[in-house]
Image (cartoon, rainbow, N blue to C red):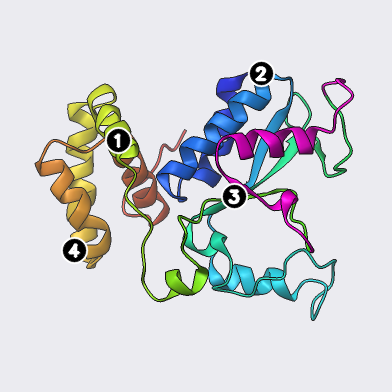
Amino acid sequence: MNLEQLLAKAEPKLSLIHPELRLKARELITRAFNMGIYVVITQGLRTIAEQNALYAQGRTAPGEIVTNAVGGSSYHNFGLAFDFAIANSNGTVIYWNTNVDTNKDRQKDWYQVGKIGQDLKMEWGGAWSGFRDIPHFQLTYGLSCADLRNGKKPPVFKAAVEEEKESVRMYKPSRVFLDDTKTVLARFENKGEKSIDKVHREKLNNGELSLDDAVGLLFHAIKEEMIQGSKK
């Protein structure tokens, strides 16, 4: 894989985490790639139900213990953490052995990536005392999980706002996309899905709807069978 492919592979897992953490994750992947290390993202946002299922592993469910965090006590549950792994050059093999040295520089890849993350001012689970979580990075903004459960929010990342504005300018949808999106939004409104249509309707009316927004809406509409995909 080239760098563009590696970043594209990571994007689905990174799309729902905090914008600043997402940018740091992309930079981590880029720096590691330049060292000959292929980083793949294995986890981004994790729901509380998913967290509880993971916590049960090795306790009340088969498998090894991989976390000490129950649902609501992991930064994954709030989009402030991601996990990574080391892959081969085409992404078909994941190396879970933390001693692996894929770039043959006589250093452990996982720990090299951990150092990159620390240089980017992320907290690395591999540096924790006691239970170490080597695949894990997080950005807490000084907030505890209890703070987050009680409704406290991390700061808005201004650079990410500017990045989104630039995305709108650079990747503005075509008229065909906009017309199709208007049709989809009308069908969402008829179905009563206000949480979906309100924000996108405002973006559409203000000329701020990005290509990613439009594509996401159209794919969701196809999934909900509101419109039909190609029969070919």
Which residue is pictured at 74% across the width and 55% down the height? 133
Whether 229 is among the magenta residues is no
How far apart, in angstroms, are the residues tagged by discs 4 and 2? 50 Å
> Does the CB distance between marks 3 and 2 fall below 8 Å?
no
- What's the amino acid at mark 4? Asn
- What's the amino acid at mark 1? Glu
| Quadrant including the N terminus | top right
Q: Nearer the viewer, residue 37 or 176?
A: 37
Which mark is on residue 181?
none
> Is disc 3 surrounded by few (<14), some (14 to 19) or many (20+) residues within 10 Å?
many
- Is 148 on the left or on the right of 119, as rendered? left
Does the image show residue 229? yes
Q: Which residue is mark 2?
A: 34
> Is disc 1 surrounded by few (<14), some (14 to 19) or many (20+) residues within 10 Å?
some
| Secondary structure at numbered mark 3 | strand
> Does the CB distance between marks 1 and 2 fall below 8 Å?
no
- What's the amino acid at mark 2? Asn
Q: Which residue is mark 4?
A: 190
